[in-house]
Image (tube, rainbow, N blue to C red):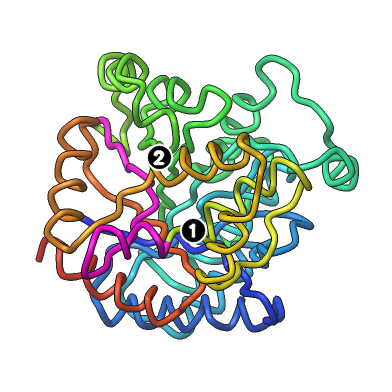
Amino acid sequence: MRVSLLDRSRTREGESDAQAIATTVDRAVRADGLGFHRFWTAEHHAVPGVAGAAPAVLLAAIGARTRDIRLGTGGVMVPNHSPLVVAEQALVLEALSPGRVDLGLGGSLGFTAPIRRALGRTSLAEGEYRADVEKVLEYLEGRAEVTARPGTGPVPVFVLAVRGGLALAAELGLPAVVGGPVLRDADRLAAYFRDFRPSPAVPDPYLVVNVDVSVADTPERARELLLPEAWAFADSREVGEFRALRPVEEVRRLLDGTTREKKRRAVDDWLDSAIAGTPEQVEDALGDLLDDTGGAEVLANVSTYDREEVAAADAFLASLRTP
């Protein structure tokens, strides 16, 4: 199967944001050596625990230290930027790493109201996101009123399945990236393939499935390794931030000590949405996921407190790739 990695530059308790960024670059270098297809970085603004704020800048550093792996924004949140700037950043990346750049576009606004105000966009009117995506395409394809620079080869565009992104990708003839609840929405997935309008660059629908993955010697241990991220997710619904990842043992104590049933359910629901198990179980589950969704590629998010566990999971996922 075609396997790629998504890295959000998550911090660990006691670790600086700068350390998280440096570790993302190191991980991308390792992923390049392992033969992964793509390495994508994400955009999160002013969120404690998530150091990745500027994917294009981070990918420039990664591109300078890698040779073969494709570099992707997973994604650039179009409402936060001028479409011209989005296109220019992608073209600069393409000039620096020719033939290796993917531009993933998303439509999410800032995580909290203060962040949205700081970014200058607190809401989106009907059709604004679509118009912005179309304008980015015009700049990349040289069809806009002004010509975006530098002039380079084509930059593939992917649309994240947020804010109607799946339907938008079908209409514009673009690959789509889906994750979360959309992976279980058979009707929306089927509509993407049914309604896909071939474009000159993308003649056939192409679906990338994004899922959290954990691999260990036992299913119990694999699920346990996901606890730091699951706890941070549940916590974010109460405090409005993704706090730094804590050690598994500490999270287990916090979970055992909480009396908040709603928080326990949030942790369990997050764990249930991930793929966790032994190598054989994970391989089978990923294959089933691709079969069930019609996906052509896995974009794996591997995140736990122990970075050695992340490296081990990466090495296993790389072994699944199609030569």
Question: Any magenta on residue 248?
Answer: no
Numbered disc 2: secondary structure: strand
Label 1 belongs to which residue? 227
Label 2 belongs to which residue? 177
Which kind of residue does numbered mark 2 sit on? Val
Q: In the rendered view, would you say 267 is above or below 163?
A: below
Which kind of residue does numbered mark 1 sit on? Leu
Residue numbers of the magenta segment: 204-225
Instruction: For the residues labelled 2 and 1, say whether their Cβ atoms are less than 8 Å apart.
Output: no
Q: Quadrant of the N terminus?
A: bottom left
Q: Quadrant of the C terminus?
A: bottom left
- Residue 40, given in percent of the width and then of the height, sits at 45, 60
Q: Looking at this view, is 163 or 249 the one in front?
A: 249
Q: In the rendered view, would you say 17 is above or below 251?
A: below
- Residue 109, given in percent of the width and then of the height, sits at 72, 37
Q: In the rendered view, would you say 62 is above or below 169?
A: below
- Residue 169, given in percent of the width and then of the height, sits at 42, 28
Label 2 Cα neighbours within 10 Å, binned few <14 / some 14-19 / many ≥20: many
